[in-house]
Amino acid sequence: MRYNINVLWVEDTRSFYEEEKDILEMFATDNGINVNFEYIEDAEVFFNAMEQQKDGFQKYDICFIDYNLSLQSDKFGDSVIKKLRGYNVCTDILFYSADDVLTIKEIIRDDFSSFEGVYVTNREHFDDKSQYLLNKNAKKLYSINNIRGLLMNETSENDYIMKSYLLRKYSLLKDNEKKELAEYIKSIIKENDDKHQSNIKEALKLIDGNTSINVNTLLRVPGDILSLNDKYELLKRILNYLEKDKIDSALLDKYLNEIVSMRNKLAHRKLEICKANKQVMHYSSINDFEQKKCNVNCSETCEHSSDNRISVETWNDIKKELKNFGQQMDELYIHL
């Protein structure tokens, strides 16, 4: 599962939903935000979703609700507000209406403690308020707790797709293509011949004497013998053989050299936000921390060593690279 902002949208005019969704998707792309919209017209589906979130895991980050949507003899918005009082709602909710904004605000004001995270707007200003909520939720990815989590989640999803593609598509190759891949893998493994002798011998048993390989077993070969980069190289070669699905080589190289490298680095380091809130500092050991830690007098102009910091600008670029590469990998997954 991607690190998406999940939006549940309750609206009975599909044309309004489609038009506004297009605008929000463009906004999300421009800002490096992954967003997933789920559209429903049935009020009971919404109530069931809220009931499930009450005692279960939170699926939705935001709900957009047309307050004037009809519900038998009652207004949908009125029914929602009544039921929300009984739910422990952590999801941001945006009610929008053509003419009932003041009414909704009065209801919320009368029972404010039950409605934290509830917003109100009219259709005319829907774009501004909905974009604000996307940004508000995306800002969570700038917290120190989520920076490492986003990198781990997105790269793990990409690794899963890469391995799935190898497993499903290898059997479609011609015999000579399988033989070429077997020779390629054998050459990689033998490059590590001076290291991990016992593991090398076991790995070579997968290939020696064969013109094809057991992909499922191969993917379990330790990373010091067959690295993640090597496995992505196998993916590229299979894509070239099949001449159907494609992946941008330059984007893949940048992903492996910059994103995966950073993921591996941050996975085992102490993280700390710079005193000026402009950098995330990372330290490999207590000695590293004591030598490079942020000065108490740090300001926006304070300079830190480039080898142990991530700026806001760099993090924005990383999120966009993750989104772009993730979209290409998701396209491959669709074709499995």
Image: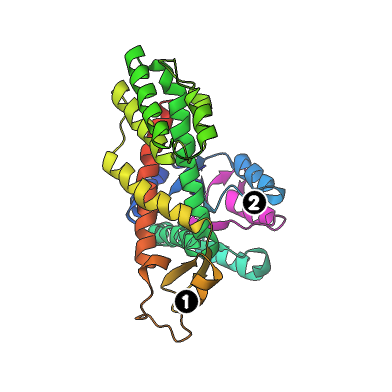
Q: Position of residue 98 (x, y in %)?
A: 45, 56
Pointer 1 residue? 291
Judged from the image, the secondary structure of the residue bearing numbered disc 1 is helix
* Type of colouring: rainbow
**Of the pair 10 and 5, the residue shown nearer to us:** 5
Q: Tell me the magenta residue range.
A: 68-96
SS of the residue at dot 2? helix
Mark 2 or mark 1: whose residue is earlier in sequence: 2
* Residue 149 visible: yes
Q: Quarter of the image holding residue 310?
A: bottom left
Viewed as shown, does residue 140 lie left or right of 88? left
Q: Is residue 91 left or right of residue 303?
A: right
Hey, which quadrant is residue 193 in on the image?
top left
Front-most of residues 272 and 127: 272
Amino acid marked by disc 1: Gln
Q: Position of residue 86 (x, y in %)?
A: 72, 55
Q: Which residue is mark 2?
A: 79
Query: Residue at the top extreme?
Result: 175
Number of other residues with Cα within 10 Å of mark 2, as a class: few under 14, some 14 to 19, many 20 or more: some
Front in this rendered view, residue 323 or 182? 182
| Residue 184, percent from left and from top | 35, 27
Q: Measuring from the top left, give residue 56's x and y in whole percent.
A: 69, 47
